[in-house]
Image: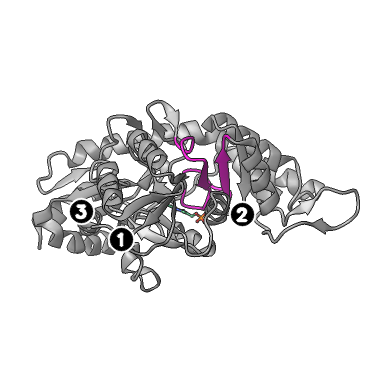
Amino acid sequence: MSSITDKITTILKGLFPESVSLHEPVFGGNEWDYVKQCLDTGWVSSAGKFVDRFEGQLAEFTGSEHVVATINGTAALHICLQLAGVQQDDEVLIPPLTFVATANAVKYCGGIPHFVDSNEKTLGVDPEKLESHLKEVAVIRSGVCVNKITERPIKALVVVHTFGHPVDLDPIVKICHYYKLKLVEDAAESLGSYYKGHHTGNWGILSALSFNGNKVITTGGGGAILTQDKKLAEQAKHLTTTAKVSHKWAYIHNCIAYNYRLPNINAALGCAQLEQLPQFLTEKRLLAKKYIKVFSGVEGVVSFIEPSYARSNYWMNVLLFDKECVNDLEITLKQTNDQGIMTRPAWNLLHTLPMFENCPRSGLETAESLATRLLNLPSSPILGMPYS
Ligand SMILES: *Cc1c(COP(=O)(O)O)cnc(C)c1O
């Protein structure tokens, strides 16, 4: 039996004597009241006051000019990429260490994921490696970035604020500007995370949030598109509402579009959840602090700590195993889960999945290393509440 595993299990059992899940939603506010209002009035579906209210409150919280609520985060990403101009056979730079939705959304537009490496200090796209990779493979022709090897345009970069931790946006914005790439932020995990004092999701031309059941706040299922651009916001609204042209009675639709609206009943949940978001964030940061403290004495592992420029929501806490201790990770996963403590490994890197294995890529050494060394710890906000 590995001693690292025993130490970690003992510490987690000390914190959580009962079984504990990875991330559970908390419904401690006005959820019942707002959902009941939907049922009482009959406004449960694609129209109603809670959608507008939710969008307005999200805009206020994130500091984003425009917010369009969607049926889920994946749909939001799909529309972000379509509006970023991603078309058939365009390449889109993305990290491999992310949830599969990031790559799927590229595919929905007919695009091709092009994987770039991550940074150990941020868990997200590494600006230095991105730049040296582009120097090697990219050339600008008539204002378009082209992959010299595949001869396909490289249209966009999607950065992911992995587990809620912001990537280093400033150098990334510069690189996108130089290489004429549209920047999209997959901010699905980073509601309540700030880069240099400003909320994530405000650097890309468009950004996507998710309110799935395991995210910082939940609407059951749901997502949102953030943008500063009024025109893009209008287009996003149009594309997510079957391109219906407003008319008193006629059914006029002027392009192929999607039914990606967030139902009012889900938005009602979202309004109640947003009211509790500041408290969730406080609790999540307290939990992170607690983890950092209790694991500081364990040799062979380190707690992931927010980058210095960031204030992170610590959506999902991460324990990183030293390179020499990767074998202990598998044993730790087994032992903790056997004892009712839900821990999880990193996602399988997307370039290893069958549908993406032939996609272009840079060297992915850091992402590959992180994927073998990363353990997600139970991270529900309620776990951060001080015990009596
Ligand atoms: C959750 C998530 C999504 C997708 O959101 P859904 O609401 O589940 O569709 C996309 N990207 C990342 C990084 C996510 O964590």
Residue visible at 40% across and 72% down?
Answer: 355
Q: Secondary structure at mark 3?
A: helix
Residue 99 falls left or right of residue 266? left
The local crowd at label 1, few if under 14, some if 14 to 19, many if 20 or more residues have their Cα within 10 Å, is some
The residue where tag 2 is placed is 71
The residue where tag 1 is placed is 361
**Residue 113: x, y in percent?**
40, 61
Chief secondary structure of the magenta portion: loop
Q: Say which of marks 3 and 1 sits in front.
A: 1
Q: Say which of marks 2 and 1 sits in front.
A: 1
**Residue 306: x, y in percent?**
29, 36
Q: CA distance from mark 2 to mark 1?
A: 31 Å
Which residues fall within the magenta stretch? 200-228
Q: Which mark is residue 9?
A: 3
Q: CA distance from mark 3 to mark 1?
A: 37 Å
At label 3, which amino acid type do we have?
Answer: Thr
Q: Is residue 377 visible?
A: yes
